[in-house]
Amino acid sequence: MAASSIEAVLFDLDGTLVDSAPELGAAADKMRVDRGLPSLPLAQYRPMAGAGARGMLGIAFGITPDTPDFGVLREEFFRNYEARMLLNTHVFDGVAELIGVLQTRRLAWGIVTNKSKRFTEPLVRSIEVFSSAGAVISGDTTPFSKPHPEPLFEAARRLELDPARCVYVGDDERDIIAGRAAGMRTVAATYGYMGVQADATQWEADGAIDSPAALLQWLKAA
């Protein structure tokens, strides 16, 4: 795909555009403290922040979605997170500048996340630079979530673009799987949460960046 044929850049949210690990970790850690357990450092939560409730509860309590009462604990986590999610969540360094350059180059852009609308919409509204997004797709916007490609197809439809003319950037292997399945070029954001012992070189992405600003060089080279 020639650079001239790239017409839009789509991004994952947590770990790609915004650093929400402090609030996600705090929401799970409060559950530990409320139960008389010792607090855990943010460094333990951060790598799994991209996995949302599943990842945070896994770190806090060593449980999985198959654990009895996981649904009850997940809702408690959601309430904790909802109460504090706008306190300290912020865009990564370079994101505002990156979006500004995309606009200058007349490239459309959007967000495709597995975060539910309950959290995505107020978070996106709270960050001024996101007001220019041409599409915001949450985990429950379509009947499917990543790694299924349908959320990416929906973003392309809203931008009125062929998916093949879009690039998808994310920090989780599910992002790359979804992007490839949608026929988009994919870029691994290795500065993100990544997961425990993740190896982005095995994801078969079309590129990798170690900062938001590095995407501009990748697009130029693409």
Image (cartoon, helix red, strand yellow):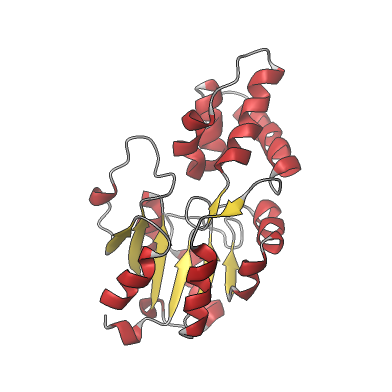
Residue 70 occupies quadrant: top right
Quick check: 114 above or below 182?
A: above
Is 33 placed left or right of 21 in the picture? right
Q: The C terminus is located in which quarter?
A: bottom left
- From where the camera sits, is residue 181 visible? no
Is 113 placed left or right of 195 in the picture? right
- How far across and down, in percent of the image, does residue 111 sit? 54, 65
Looking at the picture, tell me which residue is in the foreground, 130 or 7: 130
Quick check: 28 above or below 174?
A: above
Looking at the picture, tell me which residue is in the foreground, 159 or 199: 199
Report the label total: 0
Is 184 placed left or right of 74 in the picture? left
- How far across and down, in percent of the image, does residue 141 sit? 61, 62
- How far across and down, in percent of the image, does residue 109 sit? 51, 74
- How far across and down, in percent of the image, does residue 18 sit? 55, 54
Residue positioned 62% across, 68% down in the render? 129
Query: Outermost residue toward the top?
Result: 36
Residue positioned 59% across, 59% down in the render? 138
Residue 217 occupies quadrant: bottom left
Quick check: 175 above or below 186?
A: above
- From where the camera sits, is residue 25 visible? yes
Residue positioned 32% across, 41% down in the render? 198
Residue 220 occupies quadrant: bottom left
Q: The N terminus is located in which quarter?
A: bottom left
